[in-house]
Image (spheres, rainbow, N blue to C red):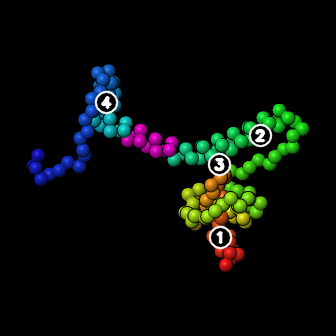
């Protein structure tokens, strides 16, 4: 091969145990591909799978927190049937609107929303890709508070 011609792919070498080498060679023969191609495909498939899982983790965590709150409240009600029922809290990204407590929010940060949320003031949906304002708070485990651009403008008008 001429020296001026550069390969597009890069070579990465690694040591593997003898039984893994045998497994890789056997599987490559079975699939009628080279060991290099098999390893390349396995790595690409693994990264695609991990990327898909990581993208869904935030939603899984949010759903788990909501579920844990609901289970805890149900368990407390079962333990003390005379206790008044507390209304369940909304998901972190979807405050109830109008009656949301925003007193601990010390600033609003403008963001482009990746997942649809509701404005804490007027309840309008802020769709994915739209501008929204997330409330910053020092209160631990506080649900996220969101405002739409119209409510931020009203907030600015009230302060002026």
Question: Image point 65% across, 70% down: which residue?
Answer: 152
Q: Residues within 10 Å of mark 2 (few under 14, many from 20)?
A: some
Alpha-carbon span between mark 1 and mark 4: 60 Å
Q: Work out how far the residue at label 2 is from the one at label 1, CA to CA, in angstroms.
A: 34 Å
**CB contact under 8 Å: marks 1 and 4:** no
Disc 2 element: helix
Q: Nearer the viewer, residue 160 or 43?
A: 160
Query: Which of the two marks, 1 or 4, is nearer to us in this view?
Result: 1
Looking at the image, residue 157 lies above or below residue 133: below
**Residue 86: where, in percent of width, then height?**
81, 46
What is the x, y in percent for residue 1? 11, 46
Q: Quadrant of residue 110?
A: bottom right
Over which residues does the magenta segment extend? Answer: 44-54
Q: Earlier in the sequence, mark 3 or mark 4?
A: 4
Q: Residue at x 34, y 31 (%)?
A: 31
Does residue 46 show up magenta in the picture?
yes
Find numbered disc 4 in the image and state the secondary structure of the residue it sits on: helix
Query: Residue 57, percent across and down?
Result: 55, 44
In the rendered image, the residue lying farthest to the left is 2
Q: Earlier in the sequence, mark 2 or mark 1?
A: 2
Q: Quarter holding the C terminus?
A: bottom right
- The foreground one among 84 and 49 is 84
Disc 3: which residue: 141
Note whether residue 95 is visible.
yes
Q: Main secondary structure of the magenta part?
A: helix
Q: Residue 152 bears which disc, if any?
A: 1
To which residue does mark 4 refer? 28
Can residue 126 be seen at all in this image of the molecule?
Answer: no
Q: Of the residues under marks 2 and 4, which one precedes in the sequence? A: 4
Q: Circle 2 sits on which residue?
A: 73
């Amino acid at each position: 091969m001429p020296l001026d011609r550069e390969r597009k792919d890069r070579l990465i070498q690694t040591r593997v145990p003898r039984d893994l080498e045998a497994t890789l060679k056997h599987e490559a023969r079975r699939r009628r591909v080279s060991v290099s191609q098999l390893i390349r495909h396995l790595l690409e498939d693994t990264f695609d799978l991990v990327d898909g899982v990581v993208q869904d983790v935030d939603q899984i965590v949010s759903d788990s927190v909501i579920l844990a709150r609901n289970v805890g409240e149900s368990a407390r009600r079962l333990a003390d049937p005379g206790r008044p029922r507390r209304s369940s809290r909304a998901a972190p990204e979807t405050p109830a609107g109008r009656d949301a407590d925003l007193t601990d929010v010390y600033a609003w940060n403008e963001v482009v929303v990746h997942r649809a949320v509701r404005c804490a003031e007027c309840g309008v949906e802020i769709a994915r890709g739209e501008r929204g304002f997330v409330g910053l708070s020092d209160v631990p485990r506080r649900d996220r508070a969101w405002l739409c651009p119209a409510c931020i403008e009203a907030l600015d008008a009230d302060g002026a």
